[in-house]
Image (cartoon, coloured by chain):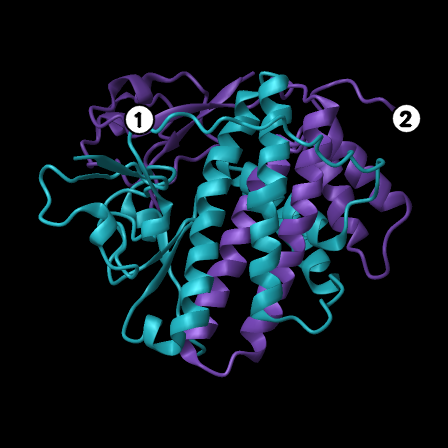
Amino acid sequence: MATRIAVRNLRLCTKDCLCLYVCPTGATDTENSIIDTEKCLGCGVCADACPGGAISMVPLDYPPQQKKEEAVVGRAKMLARSKASQEQTARQLAESAGTDGLYRLLKAVEKSVRLVNEDLLREAGYMLPQSANTHALLQALIEAPPVGFPVEAARELLTRIPCNEPTATTK
Amino acid sequence: MQKWICGICGYIYDEAKADIPFADLPDSWVCPLCRAPKSAFSPEKAPAPARAPQTPPAPIEEQRELSAGELSAVCSNLARGCEKQYKDREAALFRELADFFAAGAPPVENPDLDGLIALIRQDLEEGYPALNGAAVAASDRGTQRICVWGEKVTRMLDSLLTRYRSEGEAFLKNTQVWVCTVCGFVYVGNTPSEICPVCKVPAWKFEKIEGRA
């Protein structure tokens, strides 16, 4: 059973083709340059041979994410709420902007604030899709979905991404 | 003779090598590297500002439900997490959830530029110091890192919106606006710097913001 798969970074690949020569299954030789994960055995010979360092071995399983102190998470979430209202304000102001400069500036603010908020929430306990926090969130949304919530998407996520730590409310 | 350091990117304005003392630079002067405003600079080896015993930060709110806007950011963050793990299908599903919550976020009543700037300043004055204080106390370096990045990005937003408010469209005429797709740093200028002044990724990670189609 493979525990990792080879992934090629196209920005680094200089087409030295060593990976084609060494791959025992032909997984690296594809029309779109993306290594075929179905064929990849995870042996790593391609990554070792690549002179450009363009292939990395990505694990299939991840360790549990770092635990976070409640005092930190609480303050991060307060900041996250502020960021969410800034993003929404910028989005609305961009929609109603009458000039090109203002429109572009507010679109930039909207994107910027979203990126900062993603980072905040990542550090506030939602780093890994495999985490117990992520699973608990998806489970809660499935059990009491807001109107129109795509329940099937959430269910599919729970099936496709196994949880990698014990959950408080294991069912 | 004094050296002045940019609080965003670390650029050094060395009065010994410059023609103009820092104080005599016009207020419209910006950092040559990251275009941060003059006010983002501080003198080198400034004695650490004697921190008055801080007023205790606002108590943490009770455990509460995440708002739609926050849930959208949680889900788009998890979509990124899946992308980095090369899980394309899962990333698309998380994006679907993120879009659902973004569309359902309740509108802000009577939004205006002043209100937006006020929210941003509140983060700089209260939100970041409180979070960073908690992160230092917990030796949580990951959270200290987002405070460093987030505060710089936020300070830049404050300065850009404030400039727009006073200069209007002339500020951005024939000028591009770029966003670093990793940390959110906004750069106003025709080509982004070689590396992001905040998170140090290469220039190709910047996205140019297009006008209305």
Residue that appears at 65% across and 43% down: A79
Rendered location of residue A57, percent (x, y): 42, 22
Residue B62's quadrant in the figure? top right
Chain coloured purple: which letter? Answer: A
Chain coloured cyan in this rendering: B
Could you say whether the residue bearing mark 1 is in a helix, strand or loop?
A: loop
Say which chain tag 2 marks. A
- The numbered disc on residue B45 is 1
**Rendering coords of residue A69 (x, y %):** 70, 21
Name the spot of residue B134 as percent of width and height, x first: 64, 25
Query: Which residue sits at x=64%, y=48%?
Result: B73
Residue at point 72% right, 19% down? A165
Give residue A25's quadrant in the image.
Answer: top left
Residue linked to disc 2? A171
Report whether A57 appears left or right of B33: right
Give the CA distance from mark 1 to mark 2.
Answer: 57 Å
| Horizontal side of residue A76 vs B80, given as left or right | right
SS at mark 2?
Answer: loop
